[in-house]
Image (cartoon, rainbow, N blue to C red):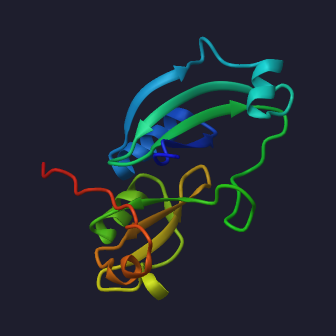
Amino acid sequence: MPRGIDHVGVTVPNIDDALRFLEEAFDAVPLYRNVTPDHPQKGPETEKILDLVKGTVVREMCMVALGEGPCIELFEMHGPAQHPAARPCDFGLQHFAVYVDDIEAACRRFTAAGGVLLTDPQKQPSLEEGPGNLFRYGRAPWGMVIELLSTPSRGRFDAVSPEKRYQPPPRDAV
């Protein structure tokens, strides 16, 4: 049986720019780089393992902690057939959500770090509706969609769920 999600892999055009954004927007912490420009991953074996287009090079990989919960594994790849970030209507990973306590402050940090917000904060719909339950989508500088989310009122969906939905624990006061 699975214990939970360990990490989500995200391909970015420039790993240092992506790290800077995640650090400034979310206090992300780079943990380690397991592929570096001095020792990239490339060739037929790498292409087979990751199902890459022939000629694609994995230049860098960095595991990043983002508060409590799963990590984000950033990949900087360069290859002959890359496309812009997928839209939420495309198949595959469409976004990841970052839990925040103060959505307005999180939005300010997101935009100051270079992100673009797509709407004003929205009330959570349906079973997720409740006092203080808000969300807002934005785009990271490389085009990927990220959701800012706050659900302090969890009674309605917890009441009908067979298990409690995961919520990151509060951060220690600094």
Q: Quadrant of residue 48?
A: top right
Q: Nearer the viewer, residue 36 or 112?
A: 36
When the figure is inspected, residue 39 is found, relative to residue 118, above or below; the finding is above
Q: Nearer the viewer, residue 19 or 74?
A: 74
Identity of the residue drawn at 32% across and 81% down: 155
When the figure is inspected, residue 159 is found, relative to residue 12, above or below; the finding is below
Q: Position of residue 51 (x, y in %)?
A: 79, 34
Identity of the residue drawn at 79% across and 33% down: 52
Q: Position of residue 42 (x, y in %)?
A: 74, 19
- Left/right placement of residue 83 relative to residue 59 reads right
Pick out the residue farthest to the left.
174
Q: Quadrant of residue 100?
A: bottom left
Pick out the residue farthest to the top.
38
Q: Nearer the viewer, residue 151 or 23?
A: 151
- Left/right placement of residue 17 relative to residue 101 reads right
Identity of the residue drawn at 50% across and 30% down: 62
**Does residue 71 appear in the picture of this structure?**
yes
When the figure is inspected, residue 173 is found, relative to residue 29, above or below; the finding is below
Q: Position of residue 163 (x, y in %)?
A: 41, 67
When the figure is inspected, residue 27 is found, relative to residue 111, above or below; the finding is above
Identity of the residue drawn at 39% across and 56% down: 112
